[in-house]
Amino acid sequence: METAYAWAGTFGETEDGLAYIGEHRRHPLCYFALGFGGNGITYSMIASESLRAQVRGRSHRYAEVFSFER
């Protein structure tokens, strides 16, 4: 019998368990929200607020915590 369908779910996470949110120095003007793991609901709100602030040229209180440079 042949397999009709297959599914796989990969789960990646950062070394410190925190998401990456913001610009990456090698990709200027690109904004990222990556590595949410099981905390997507929490980080998605922080990401939306932080990215909105960055696009507007403002700072966000958690920007450094989730930056690629941490």
Image: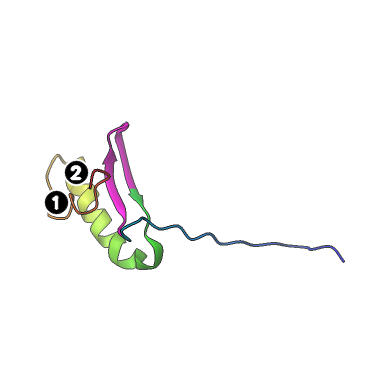
Q: Residue 7: x and y, percent? A: 64, 62
> From this viewpoint, which residue is outermost toward the right?
1
Quadrant containing the N terminus in the rendered view: bottom right
- Residue assigned mark 2: 54
Task: Give the class, few, some or many, for how many residues have Cα within 10 Å of label 1's Cα (few <14, many ≥20).
Answer: some
Q: Which of marks 1 and 2 precedes in the sequence?
A: 2
Q: Residue at x 20, y 54 (%)?
A: 65
Q: Residue at x 21, y 51 (%)?
A: 50
**Amino acid type at mark 2:** Gln
- Residue assigned mark 1: 60
**Residue 18 quadrant:** bottom left
Q: Is residue 37 above or below residue 67?
A: below
Q: Are marks 2 and 1 in contact (CB under 8 Å)?
A: yes
Q: Residue 21: x and y, percent? A: 28, 50
As drawn, is 27 to the left or to the right of 67? right
Closer to the camera, 59 or 24? 24
Marker disc for residue 9: none
Q: How many marks?
A: 2
**Amino acid type at mark 1:** His
**Secondary element at image label 2:** helix
What colour scheme was applied to this rendering of the protein? rainbow
**Residue 58 quadrant:** top left
As drawn, is 14 to the left or to the right of 9? left
Q: Residue at x 33, y 61 (%)?
A: 17
**Secondary element at image label 1:** loop
Residue 25 located within the stretch drawn in magenta? yes
Magenta segment boundaries in residue numbering: 18-32
Residue 31 located within the stretch drawn in magenta? yes
The CA span between labels 2 and 1 is 7 Å
